């Protein structure tokens, strides 16, 4: 009997030709941060995802005082395997990574920031979407089997220590082109 999610959406239909000429998110300005000396493997443990749902190979950049708001910047990377399980399932004769898995990649990178802030115990319980926060997602492209690399950039906007809640903006890029943008996304941990 309780409202779980309320939203407004706009969809478009694109021809095969239009999809082959993807423009990505126009005007996207990805946050920047220095790469680590070596990519950190994604954390392993009971509160972290594992294959096949693990959508990030590792963390390439992490600056707790970086990003657009000075509260944290993270960059996760995934090498695209054309034999990924989701390509067989989504869509028939037109394989693409589901948009929900791009969002899952963003959540997985943000989970690293939560662990840094509140310890791994906070990540034992994850409310995947904090209720009551307006947010926006823009999808302007796809990840397909021919792609080589997916990159997730996260810029933390705020922390609420009393609620163990993070609000962040994020971008997902495929082979250097930004194809998803997420604004004001809020996650609650613990």
Image (cartoon, rainbow, N blue to C red):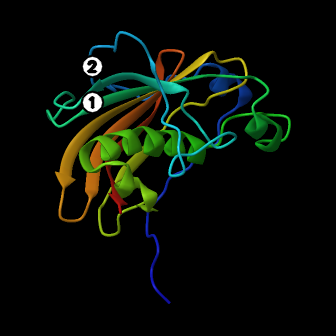
Assign a secondary structure to mark 1.
strand
* Residue 138 visible in image: no
Do the residues under discs 1 and 2 have CB atoms within 8 angstroms?
yes
Name above or below for residue 150 compared with residue 176.
Answer: below
For label 1, count other residues whose C-alpha is less than 10 Å away and answer few (under 14), some (14-19) or many (20+). many
Q: Nearer the viewer, mark 1 or mark 2?
A: 1
The foreground one among 28 and 38 is 38
9 to the left or right of 111: right
Residue occupying the far bottom of the picture: 1
Image quadrant of residue 63? Answer: top left
**Rendering coords of residue 113 (x, y %):** 32, 40
- Residue drawn at 34 percent across, 27 percent down: 28
Q: Which residue is mark 2?
A: 32
For label 2, count other residues whose C-alpha is less than 10 Å away and answer few (under 14), some (14-19) or many (20+). some
**Rendering coords of residue 181 (x, y %):** 40, 37
Residue occupying the far top of the picture: 37
Find residue 8 and name its label. none
| Marks 1/2: CA–CA distance | 8 Å
- Residue drawn at 33 percent across, 29 percent down: 74
- Residue drawn at 47 percent across, 42 percent down: 108
- Residue drawn at 75 percent across, 31 percent down: 84
**Rendering coords of residue 165 (x, y %):** 27, 57
* Residue 97 visible in image: yes
Assign a secondary structure to mark 2.
loop
Name above or below for residue 56 compared with residue 160.
Answer: above
Name above or below for residue 43 compared with residue 34.
Answer: below
Which image quarter holds the C terminus?
bottom left
**Rendering coords of residue 153 (x, y %):** 37, 29
178 to the left or right of 101: left
Name above or below for residue 94 compared with residue 6.
Answer: above
Q: Which residue is mark 1?
A: 73
């Amino acid at each position: 009997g309780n409202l779980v999610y309320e939203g407004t959406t706009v969809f478009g239909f694109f021809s095969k030709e239009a999809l082959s000429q993807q423009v990505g998110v126009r005007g996207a300005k990805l946050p920047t941060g220095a790469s680590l000396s070596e990519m950190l493997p994604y954390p392993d443990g009971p509160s972290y995802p594992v294959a096949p749902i693990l959508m990030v190979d590792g963390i390439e950049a992490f600056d707790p005082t970086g990003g657009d708001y000075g509260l944290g910047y993270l960059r996760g990377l995934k090498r695209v395997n054309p034999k990924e399980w989701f390509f067989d399932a989504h869509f028939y004769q037109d394989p693409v990574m589901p948009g929900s898995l791009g969002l899952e990649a963003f959540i997985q990178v943000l989970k690293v920031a939560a662990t840094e802030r509140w310890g791994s115990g906070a990540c034992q319980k994850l409310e995947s979407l904090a209720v009551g926060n307006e947010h926006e997602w823009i999808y302007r492209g796809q990840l397909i089997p021919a792609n080589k690399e997916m990159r997730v950039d996260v810029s933390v906007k705020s922390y609420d220590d009393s609620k163990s809640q993070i609000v962040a903006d994020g971008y997902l890029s495929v082979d250097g082109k930004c194809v998803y943008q997420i604004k004001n996304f809020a996650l609650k941990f613990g």
